[in-house]
Amino acid sequence: MSEAQEGMFGVSGTGDTSGYGGLVRTVANPGSTERPYGGYFDQLADDLERAYPDFADAITKVVVDRGELTLHVKKERLVEVAKVLRDKLLFEMCMGVSGIHYPERTGCELVAVYPLLSMTKNQRVRLEVCTSEVDPHIPSLVEVYGGNNWHERETFDMFGIIFDGHPGLTRILMPDDWDGHPQRKDYPLGGIAVEYKGATTPAPQNRRSYK
Amino acid sequence: MTTFDPYAATRETTEGTVYSVTGGDWDSLVSEIGEAKEERIIVNMGPQHPSTHGVLRLVLELEGETVTEVRPGIGYLHTGIEKNMEYRSWTQGTTFATRMDYLSPIFNETAYCLAIEKLLGITNDIPERASIIRVLMMELNRISSHMVALGTGALELGAMGPMFFAFREREAVLDTFEAITGLRMNMAYVRPGGVQQDLPEGMTVRLRELVKELRKNFKDNERLLVGNTIWMKRTEGIGYLDLAGCTTLGITGPVLRSTGLPWDLRKMQPYCGYENYEFDVITADTCDVYGRFLIRMAELEQSLRIIEQAIDKLDATHGQPVMVADKKIAWPAQLALGADGLGNSLNHIREIMGSSMESLIHHFKLVTEGFRVPAGQAYAAVESPRGELGAHIVSDGGTKPYRVHFREPSFNNLQSTSAMSEGGMVADIIGAVASIDPVMGGVDR
């Protein structure tokens, strides 16, 4: 996700006569949030700071957006933070992991997002970790949340994030001998140009697209 | 070694003898296995097997009839729905989402749309009538989904009758879906901002009759199975998974509630106005297949209670809008039933083709390009028949999702097959898998 989007209809450079090629739209991603966070988020952050002395070092950013709390965690501290959240703050469940690929964010291209749930306190919090494409390693959370086993395999399968310490990190949805990781942004949506009655429909990744 | 049998061939590998059974010559296989020195055998159950709820492969390691290891193999129905959604507009995404877990399409759509609405910041602007229709459709869908779970679950354990009754009830619900949306399954009815169209005239009368009919018919299956000695012998104490196991594995839904914990997102983190409905969260304390079966049975009645309240609310909100008022988000076409089926209403066509150029441009832009969603991420969860169905959606400010991920309860819960089955008998795997109620379309997406 770049910080600005240019053009429209997939046209760039000099070929554009529509006038939309010069259109530049800035993308405002939610940034770091200052206290007070609102709701139960302040209490949660206080509790975590108290229970986890290295809070300031491990949590790089706190974002409150659309009523959801996201803690950006340094990847080498992920397991520690998760353990504290599970044992001291009663976040018993991890609802899996979702990967995101941002090719433009150099050094931080691959992101793993963990939605945590506390049934005892009826609260949710999200952990976000990032790693680079060159060294796509993130520690595994399977020893803390056993249910993440398949979820991490799926994220490995789709994004190529290697979860260190996972008991059996193999592909789960794609065939074992598949090349590449389909959910990465540089991996085209499969398909080939289709010819029908003389007209050719280009493969999805080559079609005109709106931005 | 007996004589060569083309339907039950054997071959030697480094791991031991492999027996392939492709035909009906079971006797020759049994006699051959009887000659083998060791009891430990590895059996492939599936990927095509009538008791695996779709294309699921279970690799079983058996000692005699005792299961020592179960390894589920999935991915046979992977269709790349999450990737495809990145190439379509936000509204078109409902057409994909609805096809994941094909037994609970309305839940898929609702989770997806709730997450988009969160990103758009219009959660509180959704018209009341749209939310009521969503609740109505979700609860009808819960009934049709539980009916498949009960019917096929019983069928897999050898009871034929419940299947007939369950599918009779399911068909009644699917017919109602068809009357409301035009489709029995995969309706793409719930849309960002509301629902596709209002209920047809006179639908609440029909719904009241449906509720009456279902309440009467549910008794048939209850009489067949609740307290049935054979059924209880096959299900009691089988597929045991306690609360600690459920939290470790992230299990939600009826399996979690069978441990006695009344965790239901409809009550705990209400959405679509569920806080305005009276219903009970059903639990059991047996942690087994029978408990999960009883929970599903009792949830049918709770769904009927919610539907009855929803019908009353629908009567009270007759004629109110079912789509958000913001014209920059709401689907522009007013759908109406014509002689050739459902399509844009004549009034709408008259306006865009005859009188207002701006309306035509607006219609064209919204339908082809779609609306923009501010950058950010959101997670919305609903209580699907199988547990927490979460939609994690990321936007880059464009007209298409940057990333959509579904936290599918079937995918997550299927992991517990091993914990439920290992150490038990091979026949009990069937009951355990049936009680998880996995839908492979949702598992593989």
Image (cartoon, rainbow, N blue to C red):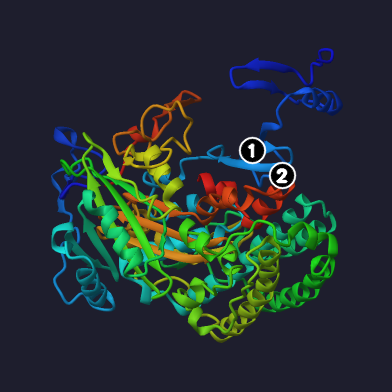
> Which quarter of the figure has residue B187?
bottom right
Residue nearest the observer in this picture, B116 or B244:
B244
Q: Which residue is mark 2?
A: B426
Work out how far the residue at label 1 is from the one at label 2, CA to CA, in angstroms. 8 Å
Q: Is residue B160 left or right of residue A187?
A: right
Q: Secondary structure at mark 1?
A: strand
Residue type at mark 2: give it: Val
Q: Position of residue B139 (x, y in %)?
A: 60, 70
- Report the front residue among A64 and B358: A64
- Label placed on residue A154: none
Residue designated by label 1: B60
The amino acid at mark 1 is Leu
Label 1 vs 2, first from the N-terminus: 1
Q: Is B38 situated above or below B261?
A: above
Which residue is farthest bottom? B316
Q: Position of residue A176 (x, y in %)?
A: 47, 29
Camera sees residue A22? yes
Mark 2 crowd level (few <14, some 14–19, many ≥20, 10 Å Cα): many
Position of residue B348 relative to residue B407, above or below, is below
Q: Is residue B100 visible?
A: no
Return the x and y of residue B401 as percentages of the image width and height: 34, 51
Q: Which quadrant of the figure contains the N terminus of chain B?
A: top right
